[in-house]
């Protein structure tokens, strides 16, 4: 058995853009690999250069097959070649945009283009205002003729990906949108997340610049869920230091509730100051049962007392 076959498998995380998804590759055959190294790998978009950003200790095996291997570390010549192809990407976007107008493709927006590092493959990213699949055969044919011998692919992306690529100010006023700054993968966002946090459901409050629900709705969602578990729900009856009342509102982050009290009005209380009427009734019943049991002669001492 060769020395190479005895080597333990080494899996690393590679990223192809500054705020992009991390993909795992097999780096077993690469010696002296360090974080920050630029590696040459084969992807669905052709040969690409990616930065090694982490070593994976206990990777989960892919559902089918194994991890693709890192081909080699990039050379200075590779980096220069990559930069030269990147410089041509804005020109591709302009040409494609012109052709879209000439073909009168309504609702099609050319977002960006990506060359593989060796220029063998060109991917043009676009978005569509329509939910129906656009007929782009003519556009692809024209782009293929113009940029041959590169293999041209048209790939549709969603509104969130468009916002991530375009960048700009967020709906909250931050100079850089979260998706462009650090979000590498988009999570599933629902209207329930806004409701749980008591956020106004008006579109301007919960919608991002992409026209979809804001990614930030998920940031504190789990914290609100955990906090609500320890608080009485709305419309429940509670016992407070000022008497019994009904819960009008809940403030999870303050661990407090707003209670409507007869003849007093609304007062805010910390969760430790109140008790649910239902819980109080259970406690009173348990105490009553205990007293009855003690007085009913169930133990030897009590029986002697009763005699």
Image (tube, helix red, strand yellow):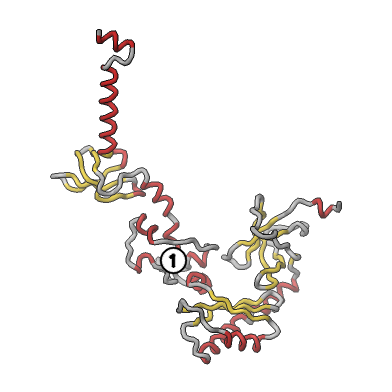
Q: Is residue 8 above or below residue 132?
A: above
- The part of the image, by quadrant, that contains residue 297 is top left
Task: Name the residue rendered at 35%, 68% in the picture.
Answer: 203
Q: Is residue 79 above or below residue 297?
A: below
Callout 1: helix, strand or loop? loop
- On screen, residue 111 versus residue 200, left or right, reads right
Q: Position of residue 210 (x, y in %)?
A: 44, 71
Residue 40 appears anywhere in the view: yes
Question: Which residue, as the protein is rendered here, is positioned at the far right?
Answer: 1
Q: Position of residue 305 (x, y in %)?
A: 26, 9
Instruction: Please identify the quadrant where the C terminus is shown.
Output: top left
Frontmost residue, 227 versus 287? 287
For label 1, the crowd category at 10 Å Cα-Cα, with few meaning under 14, some 14 to 19 and many 20 or more, is few
Task: Name the residue rendered at 29%, 11% in the picture.
Answer: 303
Q: Position of residue 196 (x, y in %)?
A: 36, 55
- The part of the image, by quadrant, that contains residue 278 is top left
- On screen, residue 14 versus residue 231, left or right, reads right
Question: Which residue, as the protein is rendered here, is positioned at the far bottom?
Answer: 102
Q: Is residue 93 above or below residue 283?
A: below
Residue 274 appears anywhere in the view: no
Q: Position of residue 112 (x, y in %)?
A: 56, 78
Question: Which residue is identified by label 1?
Answer: 174
What is the number of callouts on the image? 1
- On screen, residue 49 versus residue 90, left or right, reads right
- The part of the image, by quadrant, that contains residue 148 is bottom right
Task: Name the residue rendered at 25%, 48% in the picture.
Answer: 235
Frontmost residue, 238 versus 289? 289
């Amino acid at each position: 058995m060769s020395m190479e076959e005895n080597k333990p498998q080494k899996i690393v995380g590679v990223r192809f853009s500054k705020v992009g998804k991390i993909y795992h590759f097999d780096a077993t055959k690469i010696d002296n690999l360090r974080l920050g190294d630029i590696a040459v790998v084969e992807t669905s978009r052709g040969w690409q250069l990616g930065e090694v950003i982490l070593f994976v200790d206990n990777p989960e095996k892919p559902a089918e097959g194994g991890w693709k291997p890192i081909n080699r570390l990039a050379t200075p010549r590779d980096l220069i070649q990559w930069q030269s192809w990147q410089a041509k990407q804005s020109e591709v976007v302009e040409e494609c945009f012109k052709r879209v107008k000439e073909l009168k493709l309504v609702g099609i927006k050319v977002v960006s283009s990506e060359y593989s590092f060796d220029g063998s493959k060109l991917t043009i990213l676009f978005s569509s205002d329509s939910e129906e699949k656009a007929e782009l055969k003519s556009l692809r044919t024209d782009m293929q003729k113009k940029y041959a011998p590169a293999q041209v692919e048209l790939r549709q992306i969603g509104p969130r990906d468009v916002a991530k690529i375009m960048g700009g100010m967020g709906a909250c006023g931050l100079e850089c949108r979260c998706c462009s700054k650090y979000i590498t993968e988009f999570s599933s966002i629902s209207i329930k997340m806004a409701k749980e946090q008591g956020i106004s459901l008006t579109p301007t409050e919960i919608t991002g610049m992409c026209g979809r629900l804001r990614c930030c709705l998920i940031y504190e969602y789990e914290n609100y869920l955990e906090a609500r578990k320890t608080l009485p729900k709305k419309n429940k009856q509670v016992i407070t230091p000022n008497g019994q009342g009904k819960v009008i509102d809940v403030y999870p982050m303050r661990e407090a509730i707003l209670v409507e009290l007869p003849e007093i009005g609304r007062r805010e209380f910390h969760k430790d100051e109140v008790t649910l009427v239902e819980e109080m009734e259970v406690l009173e019943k348990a105490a009553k049962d205990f007293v009855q049991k003690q007085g009913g002669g169930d133990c030897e001492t009590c029986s002697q007392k009763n005699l």
